[in-house]
Amino acid sequence: MKTVAEPERERASSFCTISGRPIARLYTTDDVADINYARDVNDPGTFPYTRGIHATGYRGKLWTMRQFAGFGTPEDTNKRYKTLLRAGGTGLSVAFDLPTLMGRDPDHELSLGEVGKCGVNVMSLADMETLFDGIRLADITTSMTINSPAAMIFAMYLVVAEKQGADWKKISGTIQNDILKEFIAQKEYIFPPRPSMRIITDIFAFCAREAPKWNTISVSGYHIREAGATALQELAFTLRDGVEYVQWGVDAGLDVDAFVPQMSFFFNAHSDFFEEIAKYRAARMIWARTMRDRFGTNNERAWKLRFHSQTAGVSLTAQQPYNNVVRTALQALSAVLGGTNSLHTNSLDEALALPTAEAATLALRTQQVIAHESGVANVVDPLGGSYFVERLTKDLEDGALDYFAQIDRMGGMVEAIERGFPQQEIAESAYRFQQAVERREQIIVGVNDFVQTDEPPIEILYIDESAADTQLDKLAKLKRTRDRDAVRRTLDGLRAAARTTENLMPRILDAVRAYATVGEMCDALRDVWGEYEEVPRI
Amino acid sequence: MRKLRVVIAKPGLDGHDRGAKVIARALRDAGMEVIYTGLRQTPEMIAAATLQEDADVVGLSILSGAHNHIAPRLMALLHAKGLDDVLVVIGGIIPDVDIPKLKEIGVRGIFLPGTPMQEIVEFINANARARV
């Protein structure tokens, strides 16, 4: 009998990740020959933390299950938070609406139709008091996705905590406060880059003294990825943003050992399973090395990159929305295998609208199944030592360092942004991805393959205009009842301080206590710094 | 016949411009003249740009839920400027229940997430008439 050699044909002429990175058929010992375990990988809890920042992994403590939520009025969102906490959520995460994110009160022309739509509307301390009514800030941790007006919203949170009798030194949580990725990707900027960076270093300095357990920033790759970046670009731009913040802190005279441990990160959990895991592992390694070697810090806490992750909103499809549950579960699993410190899982209906309470609960259950049923949380970094994952981790590190060098040559990230470099890189990747989808080189189940035409519609959350009406009424009432002199005096104080190098946080706290609105405080700073306008580029 | 002129606009406060930029490039690659307004455009600014650029098509990218406010205002402004023959299309996240209302006020094309770029190109080619 004649034996026939097995044919070498493969499904495609080449294979690559969702980011376009070529992938070989097989990885072997040859692929990891240049990787030194002690130097490049090492055990969990030891430098450079590739395998994780805790020796015990999730055996010590599971990740925080932190579901991002916010819509309508503070009353509406307060109710949703109580539902999430009852369902076993272990932290809160506030989604603000566009007027709040952009520092505009509900009565501003540009707020038309946007109040309470994409998140909760919070215009003054009164709203913050309502948002956390019946929730003890001393007992929970809260993450707030707020950037340009981060200092104002944080000040409101601090004052609510104070009124509840909580100690600022003990409360914990996170403000996103990452303006660089706003210029790069998310585009919710108000002030020009340089004064924006000054507010951030003011917050670093303030928190090092007054709120040492607070995460002063969440340097975010999430939005960079959503805007179309590849996994490598997400990794590189995010960490280089982190470097930029540290450099500005150093230049402002702050002590690296004191403020860097309060920095945290936020990554996307996208669909290419192994590339994502490698991305998180590479991120920890790069940060540890950069903090030690570039900034010379010997504080171990400054070496350890802590990060939140969120499954990829951009991967959700409006078609066959139940498929999104599966996508989200796999993405969440990659974040867990990559050692995320906290996680948000998206809801199945988010390509259509903000999630219903049922969909948001199912998203949380997805995390609970991974944590308590799959067994993956019983061992630390189970993929460590995989030829493929270690190779990918190292390649992503090398690629990110190339981007670092390129941005350093431009003079830093602020300069790179001013010349549109990361923006253009991302737009290029977004377009390439869309073309791959159109050519069906990239299959999206239910969209460009396995299409179904007889889908029944699902129920979605519909946000009407009542939130806007309520908030407008409240604003009018607030303006009638608050101490007008105190508002004027504190806003004048803030405006004057913006012209100096004085730390702005105490001034903002004064204005918040006088019930000045987010719009008024931002206007005071607009008077001094103006607004940033991007040159539109295709 | 001259090339179709398309204004791609991003109204409201939202900054998610991935869709607007991708479609702007796709339309340009399909041979149209594309003018991208950039972010935070009011209906007044968009109507003015449409007139000034002598556009045949206005494409709005809206993901924030503000379409019910922005679209009627833009349509009224276009009408007031005598620009009723401009083809108005919207791409983004639009709940099903809002689609009939938008169609009624004259928004001719509504493209939801996952729409192939080619479909939008074909729709514009079939429905916009380049004015001479």
Image: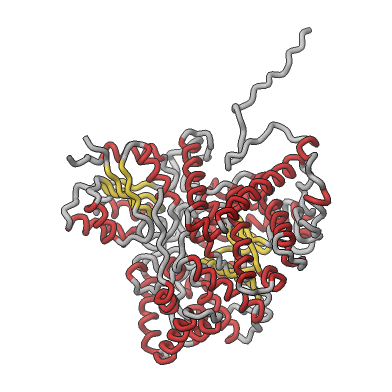
B42 w.r.t. A396: above or below: below
Q: Residue at x 52, y 73 (%)?
A: A78
- Front one among A194 and A439: A194
Front residue (pair A41, A244):
A244
Give the x, y percent position of residue B109: 31, 46
Task: Answer whether residue A145 is visible to the viewer in this image.
Answer: yes
Front residue of this view, candidates A158 and A499:
A499
Q: What residue is at 69 percent from the left and 70 percent from the top? A: A256
Q: Percent position (x, y) of residue A24?
A: 68, 33
Image coordinates of residue A149 in percent, x first then y, are 49, 72
Q: Quadrant of residue A133?
A: bottom right
Q: Quadrant of residue A487?
A: bottom left
The residue at the far top in this view is A1
Going 44% across and 76% down the picture, which residue do you hit? A525
Q: Position of residue A132 (x, y in %)?
A: 55, 77
Lateral position of residue A268 relative to residue A525, left or right: right
Q: Is residue A92 visible?
A: no
Front residue of this view, candidates A313 and A364: A313
Q: Quadrant of residue A345?
A: bottom right
Please state, as top left, top right, bottom left or bottom right, where the N terminus of chain A lies in the image.
top right
Coloration of the structure image: secondary structure
Residue at the location (17% across, 56% down)?
B81
How many marks are shown on the rendered structure? 0
Residue A411 drawn above or below residue A76? above
